[in-house]
Amino acid sequence: VHGTAMGTCMAPTYANIFTGAIEAGLLCAFPDKPLIWLRYIDDIFLIWTHGRAKLECFIAHANTFHPTIKFTSSISDTQIPFLDVMVSLKNNSLHTDLYSKPTDTFNYLHWSSCHPLHTKSSIPYSLAFRLIRICSCEDTLTRRLTELTEHLKRRGFPLKHIQKTILKAKETPRSTAIQRRRLPETQKNRIPFVITYNPALPNISSILKKYFPILHTPPRCRRAIPHLPMAAFRRPKNLRDSLVHANIQKTHICGSRPCNIRRCLTCKLITTTSQFTFTVTGKTYNILHNLSCDSHNIIYLITCTKCKKQYVGLTSQTLRKRFNTHRSNINNQRGDAVGLHFNLPEHDIGHLQVIPIDQLKNTDMIGLQNKETFWIKTL
């Protein structure tokens, strides 16, 4: 087995380490070197100055360097894309422009989406700032910003907000924008206050800022939380989470069955079936859950095979524990209607059959009592 699973947190780091080792050996083993060699994980941009023939030899060398790693290449004398940048050669100078794949639909987050306002508001600024960094010519930048405005308008963004954020982004000169930014230590060490987002929430950041001085009053708290916590919103459950499941759902066979747990005495009394019939009405019903002696929060049906009388009961415990009580009442000739019935003449516990017929997923005695009442009336 080669490679790593896609989507895991360690996959990019693992790929970087592996590709870095391949890269070092690959370049050292070939006599001619590229003028420029830039790599992002497994995407490489290089400038070759030794002629087309030697370039093809270098690519062939790269494809034989490792038994499982193969490189695809695009070669051009004028322009070539690298990641989201189109690099072109004009008048012996390199120029850069935005590169978008033909399949790109520019479906940015819609303005009406249920997201924090600061998340939606920052999208035009981030995209405009990205264009300022990528586009090396002013005319190209103007054209790309116009295209961006149309894409954002199509996604419901207000025109005034788009124009305002683009002007804000253009205040930063490109020479400054392309520099690597380093976060101050106070930003790196901020503790996030994580909360599930809801549009009805108040302004969490303002509340944190207002009451943070109180938290800083005790010296111990001041040392533990030196900087203002940062509000971080967790995504709530959305429609996709409710309607689409990535995991394959297990198929549950509905019906009644013994649990087959060692020493379970109820297994001898339970009937294996997917249906049950009321002897008074003669109506048959399907069991809609997978139930056994080990199931809890259930409604159960006891049938006397001698006289065909039936009893509907409930239990929040497992059926096995509930039947320990029924069995004790029968053996000691005491207790409830079940204990009295199976001590009648010519009756014994051997005439008892039980079928769990319904279930609640949560322990809710009122819900169980309502279900019991429903089935008693149906009986």
Image (spheres, rainbow, N blue to C red):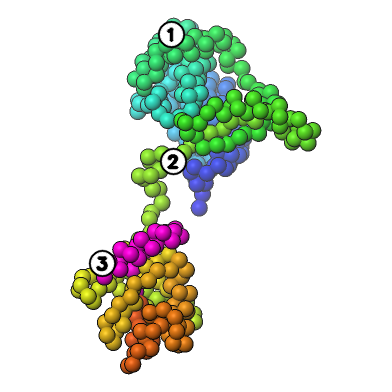
Q: Residue 150, percent across and down? A: 36, 15
- Give 89 or 338, whichever is nearer the viewer: 338
**Kind of element beneath mark 1:** helix
Task: Measure how far apart labels 3 and 1 are at the Cα level.
Answer: 75 Å
Residue found at the very far bottom of the displayed protein: 346
Q: Please state if 118 lies on the left or on the right of 193 as rendered.
A: left
Residue 27: which numbered mark, if any?
none
Residue 378: which numbered mark, if any?
3
Q: Residue 17, percent across and down? A: 60, 39
Residue pictured at 75% horizontal, 35% vertical: 221
Residue 200, visible in the rendered structure: yes
Which mark is first along the chain, 1 or 2? Answer: 1
- For disc 2, the marked residue is 237
Q: Residue 153, percent across and down? A: 36, 17
- For disc 1, the marked residue is 142
In the image, the segment drawn in magenta is: 355-379
Which mark is first along the chain, 2 or 3? Answer: 2
